[in-house]
Amino acid sequence: MKRHYALTLFLASIVIVAFAAVAGSGSTSDLPAPPAIGTTLDDFKLPDADGAEHSLKSLTGKNGAVIIFVATKCPVSNAYNDRMEKLAQDYKAKGINVIGINSNNTEPAAEVKSHAGEKHLTFTILKDEGNKIADRLGATRTPEAYVIDASGKLVYHGRIDNAQNTANITSNDLRDALDELVSGKQVSKTGGAAFGCTIKRVS
Amino acid sequence: MRLRLLILLTVCALVGFAAPAQTPSAGVASTNKTPGPLVLDRVNTNDVAEIDLEGLKKILQRNPKDTRPLLINFWATWCDGCREEFPDLVKIDNDYRDKGLNFVSISLDDVAEIKTAVPEFLKSMKAKMSVVLLNVKDPEPAIHAVDATWDGALPATYLYDKDGKVVFKYFGAIKPAELRSAIDKQVGSKP
């Protein structure tokens, strides 16, 4: 009786392992899907590069916020430094705050801080240790933008514009979305794809 | 009796799991009646051809006479995840080209670098696969032509079977063992 029980257990464990092997097979990146447009984002807390904690709610302006996943080393993200800073300045006055999030495992807080200083980025940049918020938002690359209204509802998720080189911009998707949000209109184009560097996640 | 039943179930389960996984199709049935203008064969130089959105679509639709599985990798010299994985991709190309794998490497570098930084990088990597440079005014149609759920994160790797179905996709530097395992399943299969 005991022998059969052990064998049963052994065979059952083979089945479980086989199942796990297939379920965990890396045929696709195992990233969670981003929240759908219209979803209200849960509040979260992250430290800035000085270690001071901020909640998303406290950083959200009276008309909303733009979360942008950024990097110190990605040339695409860096190509947008001036644009992001200008966005922050232009829209702060209109009640929308730009919030940077650095989720890269390879870019520590000290580097985020010195990079922001060098590039004259004045908006708050939060450090997302263990890429938890990147996972929660299904963020995959830098730069990648999420716009929420004052209540935290997601109204836009995607690119800043259609060209790394400012001379080639023909579609200012993020600004268009922000202008619609500020004037109380429905955001008409809720996202857009562009090439960027994958976020360096903890493995 | 119960034990025999359990053994039978285990064997069935293992056989079931060993079957190739079904993944949603992102491939496009070829509508080309004529072969595409790009003949992507073994290269002796690191010359990089420029393609536009139409050129990308032709690569994805494939020459109907070409029944090789297709591996495509999107990268750029400015993307450090891309640079990290490149040596593994060069090895995979060397190992599988003669086994019937068609590998097209697609650079998203600025077209200004097509005769400079891009071939220099390929030379330093001793790359032998076909490389094209995608030059588009708006990246979005190109990104969506590949995959409606891709948002443009680089590097991005897609493996299609001989019928154009996606059997492997990955964003970020690949894990070579996983990609090789996926390729093995394709090159081992008879047309």
Image (cartoon, rainbow, N blue to C red):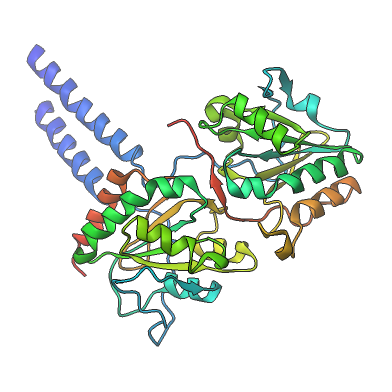
User: In the figure, is residue B86 to the left or right of A182?
Assistant: left
Identified at 76% across, 48% down, the residue is A83
Between B36 and B79, the one nearer to me in the picture: B79
Residue B145 vertical placement versus A25 (above, below): below
Q: Quadrant of the N terminus of chain B?
A: top left
Residue situated furthest top in the rendering: A2
Q: Is residue A90 left or right of residue B109?
A: right
Between A25 and A94, the one lying in front of the other is A94
The answer, for residue B171, to whether it is visible in the render is no
The x and y percentages for residue A164 are: 66, 56
Q: Quadrant of the C terminus of chain B?
A: bottom left
Q: How many marks?
A: 0
**What residue sits 67% from the left and 51% below the top?**
A159
User: Is residue A194 positioned above or below B49 on the image?
Assistant: above
User: Would residue B89 be visible to someone looking at this image?
Assistant: yes
Please tell me which residue lies in front, B115 or B160: B115
Q: Position of residue A125 (x, y in %)?
A: 70, 31
Of B191 and B49, the residue lying toward us: B49
Quarter of image, res A24: top left
x, y percent for residue A188: 78, 56
Eyeballing the image, is A150 above or below A183? above
Instruction: Locate residue B54, reporting x and y percent.
Output: 53, 76
